[in-house]
């Protein structure tokens, strides 16, 4: 592949930006998606575009700084926080989870004793992972969530195979809380008033009938706070670029601010309830 110099790269990026602005509205119509925001970055430059509406009920336009729930991309933030603790020497990825959370229990006691943080990170812990019990909105929600797992069955021996595990990332969130000695605040500054109003975030999901889109109320966040480590962060396009760029620079040995990996302008959706 031919490597582009700076000017060629910028010209190509501008072409991409023009294409995005021209095609995105039509692509939304073709895909029956109410609204979207898209960005493409090359080096330190990027282009961005938005089209459509955040809600067919309100008609509020989608913009590049609108919030979209990013679902399980949240797990990248959780994993980053865990790896920062490992880099600091405060967490051994191959030690049992109980080294940090002695109260960790599942139905299979032998498995519970052997499950490690690395197992959780890699989705190979082996216990049932689709546990979506609401444990409230308080700062103790992840601590309570841990208690919900006591009767969860073990499906296979830890490390034997891959099986996507949302619950495991909630446990990782609790590990971060305990070692940092503060509640998990993925993607937000300590000031909870920094969030956008409900009207500025996407509130749609695909309907049950093929090709339909159903409006959702702004407060209808499908993931409660206890699932914070697995998938409830809302973010905008600049936030995703900033987080992604931080990881790339870190991998290449560049300087990064630890907060760039997980914070501003990404925000925990719980601060946006009207």
Image (spheres, helix red, strand yellow):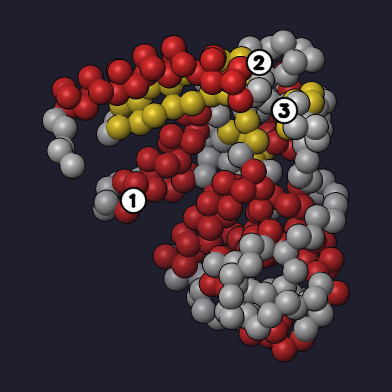
Q: Where in the figure is residue 267, as x and y percent of width and height? A: 62, 35
**Of the numbered discs in the image, which one, if any, rests on residue 250?**
1
Q: Which residue is mark 2?
A: 53
SS type, badge 2: loop
What residue do we see at 76% from left, 12% from top?
Answer: 58
What residue do we see at 81% from left, 72% from top?
Answer: 152
Q: Where in the figure is residue 106, as x and y percent of width and height? A: 78, 77
Compared with 47, 256 (above or below) is below
Q: Which residue is mark 3?
A: 211
Who comes first in sequence, dot 3 or dot 2?
2
Who comes first in sequence, dot 1 or dot 2?
2
Q: Are marks 3 and 2 in contact (CB under 8 Å)?
A: no
What residue do we see at 66% from left, 48% from top?
Answer: 231
Q: Closest to the observer: 87 or 130? A: 130
- Label 3 crowd bin: few (<14), some (14–19), many (20+), radius 10 Å: few
Who comes first in sequence, dot 1 or dot 3?
3
Where residue 87 sits, quadrant-wise, is bottom left
């Amino acid at each position: 592949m031919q490597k582009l110099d700076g000017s060629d790269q910028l010209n190509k990026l501008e072409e991409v930006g023009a294409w995005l602005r021209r095609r995105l509205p039509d692509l939304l119509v073709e895909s029956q998606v109410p609204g979207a925001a898209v960005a493409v970055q090359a080096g330190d430059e990027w282009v961005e575009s938005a089209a459509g509406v955040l809600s067919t009920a309100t008609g509020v336009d989608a913009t590049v700084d609108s919030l979209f729930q990013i679902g399980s991309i949240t797990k990248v933030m959780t994993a980053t926080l865990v790896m920062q603790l490992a880099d600091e020497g405060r967490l051994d990825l191959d030690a049992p989870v109980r080294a940090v959370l002695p109260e960790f229990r599942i139905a299979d006691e032998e498995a519970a004793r052997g499950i490690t943080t690395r197992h959780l990170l890699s989705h190979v812990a082996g216990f049932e992972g689709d546990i979506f019990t609401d444990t409230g909105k308080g700062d103790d929600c992840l601590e309570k969530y841990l208690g919900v797992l006591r009767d969860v069955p073990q499906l296979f021996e830890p490390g034997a195979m891959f099986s996507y595990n949302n619950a495991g990332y909630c446990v990782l969130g609790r590990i971060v809380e305990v070692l940092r000695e503060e509640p998990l605040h993925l993607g937000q500054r300590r000031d909870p008033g920094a969030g956008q109003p409900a009207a500025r975030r996407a509130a749609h999901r695909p309907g049950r009938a093929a090709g339909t889109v159903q409006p959702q109320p702004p407060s209808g966040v499908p993931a409660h706070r206890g699932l914070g480590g697995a998938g409830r962060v809302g973010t905008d396009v600049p936030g995703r670029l900033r987080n992604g760029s931080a990881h790339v620079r870190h991998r290449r040995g560049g300087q990064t601010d630890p907060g760039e990996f997980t914070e501003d302008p990404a925000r925990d959706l719980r601060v946006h309830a009207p």
